Image (tube, coloured by chain):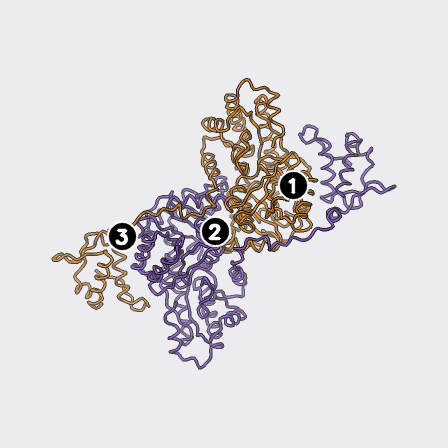
Chain colours: A orange, B purple
Amino acid sequence: MRLKINKELSLPVYRQFIDGIKEQILSGTLPAGFVLPPERKLAAENDVSRTTVVRAYDELKALGLVASYRGKGTVVTDKKEPSHRENPNVFPLSWYPLFEKKLENVSDTITDLMDVGSRQDTISFAAGVGAPELYPINQLKIIQNDSACTSEVLNLSAVEGYYPLRESLSQLMERRGISTSAKEVMILSGSMQGIDFAARTFLSPGDAVIVEEPTFLQAIQCFRAAGARIIGIPLDREGIRTDVLEAQLGRYKPKFIYTIPTFHNPTGIVMSLERRMELLRIAYKYQVPILEDDPYSEIRFLPQKLPPLKALDHYGYVIYLNTFSKVLFPGMRVGWVVAPAPVRKKFTLLKQITDLHVNTPAQYVLDQFLREGHYEPHLERELTIYEKKRNIMVSALKQAEGLVGFDVPDGGFYLWCRIPYTIPQKQLLSLCASKGVLYTPGSVFYPQESDGEHLLRLNFTYESRERIEKGISIFIEAVKKLSKHNTKMDSIIEEYRPLV
Amino acid sequence: MRLKINKELSLPVYRQFIDGIKEQILSGTLPAGFVLPPERKLAAENDVSRTTVVRAYDELKALGLVASYRGKGTVVTDKKEPSHRENPNVFPLSWYPLFEKKLENVSDTITDLMDVGSRQDTISFAAGVGAPELYPINQLKIIQNDSACTSEVLNLSAVEGYYPLRESLSQLMERRGISTSAKEVMILSGSMQGIDFAARTFLSPGDAVIVEEPTFLQAIQCFRAAGARIIGIPLDREGIRTDVLEAQLGRYKPKFIYTIPTFHNPTGIVMSLERRMELLRIAYKYQVPILEDDPYSEIRFLPQKLPPLKALDHYGYVIYLNTFSKVLFPGMRVGWVVAPAPVRKKFTLLKQITDLHVNTPAQYVLDQFLREGHYEPHLERELTIYEKKRNIMVSALKQAEGLVGFDVPDGGFYLWCRIPYTIPQKQLLSLCASKGVLYTPGSVFYPQESDGEHLLRLNFTYESRERIEKGISIFIEAVKKLSKHNTKMDSIIEEYRPLV
């Protein structure tokens, strides 16, 4: 039995010798029951002193890896045995008492939805993504084959992001009325990471944060995980109710205001210009920063567009988040933030201790895609199709004979619908799921899940036109089946206004 | 002057009309000083009532976007003006009082180092990465051109990770003696995200966490950001001092023990088998989970290998972290965790509210790379070269005439060196930097930065052999220049033992 011994090494010979045998036992090379050679023999074979072998065998015995039996010699034991034998009273660890309390408020609705959504046979109106068949695969292939596979692109990149992409994005921002330098743009792993970083930068347990009610599900989860008090401000068709907001600001001292001003998720509402200016006035007056989440503003079916809050803010109160996930590839997980220097510094520290930087190849190919001018034409192609899909879903829902109320949004990804009070949401949800149709119930968008019982969100961008029609007719059947037949049209309309 | 009006829309005509003008003003299409047409004329041109135009102009005036001058008409103002005029007393926001206190403990050493390291003319021994010239670019290209560019690969994937990669990794784990199913493996954005998730899952401010002293810089930063008390346990050449650990466990009730048992960063120490078993015994006895960070175990220049703690743990106390960043592409930011179900559930919730999932294309190509059997041959090629590089650095350092003390590690990425007490680290660091050589000072690896003043870490994998020799000779010159000449050899040796 020969063992690899290298007398050049700093590791002492006896240690190499011992480890060598241990490794063979633990790796199973020397199985349980294997009889080791007599000490003298092993010493000779490996040109080491007998003391070394004796010492080795003793150590192995002490560890319970081998045992000596008179007349039989030194035998390898079952290596799983010792730890059990050594610790007769080891108990399985009870994890839950060790966990941080704050996380208990976070629920896992999303993974559940994504799980079901990933099934082939399911028509999903619950998704928050665009149509995969529209991805500009060919342009991406060309970029990747040309230049994306270099050691530079596969190596670490700067924490703040790949500089050329930051340049390209500052130009994209320019076109949206936000004049910013490349240095002010920081690349994130999706805009959601910006929400998480804002929570970690500003929120201590018990701190207040203002959100629109309803609002983006994961933002609620994220603020809950920070242990924050989430103050919901109602919306009307002009956006956040700034009058209610200002009243609340007297009572609470929120760390920031989270808002989705353009094609709000889930309602599709566009905040009017005067509300935007009013919101800024209030932020200035009460010295509260604004976290502007803007993933949907480019999914716009009308020429009219309103400037983002960031473009109207001349005092640096607004932290602006955006992402490639709605217009391009959600699987790449690339978003960005435009923020004042002190905030960027904190975000950079957080990036350093969480995931260091965004996947470099993804940053590279997205930069090339922008530089080669593919972005705008691609967006136009998408908009034509998404507008058609919206129209298909809208006219399909018309067959609900007034049972389903909604506004027709001029952009974004969603229809925000109201169903009669007589229909229990849980029943509708499971009935639809049983028929292979998935949507998002309204309550998950409310911080306290206290409201939204009779509201729901339908995504119109992900599924094909055929599946939209099929899915909506299944949905309507379910609604009709569950709605009491004595419900009157007008009473529905009553319920339906105001929408939020 | 024609405006796009669509009477089909839910958006009222007057609103479209107003927004249309606003957009043209805010986008600069109607520049400051532009005179708007008389109300009657504009109404006619756009086939809207005069009231609509009057209302529009009034609203624009209210917003300060236009002003009326007798005899001149309605003129566009400088759009930046109004907000100033409206809010004479707006102050720039003072951000710092709003920030969470815990983050103040986090320093940005790392970005600084990375910045300098990225300069062409700098020889960096500070990096924690392998040699970019060894990346298996060609195999990666083939995978990408063949199949990586599909709408499936560019779409969202499961929060826990791309399932085929989880399968491949469970097989890789099997080869390391860790028997696990694909479901038990979760993909992370680098193994560092696992450290952050563990901190967020277990640590409330004031909680104790055990680390080896010295230890991985970013782990310290991460635990600081959680507001934890970081208890450092000294190492010797057998690894963490379990006797000291057990003594400390009497006093503190740590939430978990963070350890890098194999080719420890920064010291390169391999925890002996008996220490591993002792550490597990203590964890079982005191019911403390272990966070095992294992990025370097495959960078091994000797046949002898010891099983990871996870392989020796029969009671599910160990959370095991690993990464592709040391053996493959650090820029892809892909790591993984093998953990008990309750921990995985918490990590999944955190993944959901931070970055949703790891970049799908990266997960796909890495899975293919493993499935096509490229991993092991690639690793072997790397090891031959890294061992040569280690030897080159070691013999280059011999010329320091005993001024620089170190153990020769049998693997990993680093040499952990001691310099004479007579040399101030700051001076050496800046002298080397001025000559274009970068290394990592020892103190950053100590939780309190109280120690390590005369220790430093040299990476031997990143730079070319030529640049290693050049850089080390510059380093040695600097050491000699700063060391008092009356320092005796033996006194150095004295200082040098024990190394940590």
- Spatial CA distance of label 1 from label 2 is 48 Å
Residue placed under numbered mark 1 in the picture:
A247
Residue pushed farthest right? Answer: B71
**Is the residue A494 above or below the residue A186 in the image?**
above
Select label 1 or label 2 by which is in front.
1
Which residue type carries mark 1?
Ala
Give the mark nearer the N terminus: 1 vs 3: 3
The x and y percentages for residue A265 are: 58, 37
Which residue type carries mark 2?
Met
Tags 2 and 3 in contact by the CB under 8 Å rule?
no
Q: Is residue B279 left or right of residue B102?
A: left
What is the crowding at mark 2: few (fewer than 14 residues within 10 Å), some, or many (at least 20)? many
Residue pushed farthest bottom? Answer: B486
What is the crowding at mark 3: few (fewer than 14 residues within 10 Å), some, or many (at least 20)? few
Which residue type carries mark 3?
Asn
The label number, if any, that marks residue A87 in the structure image: 3
Total numbered labels placed on residues in the image: 3
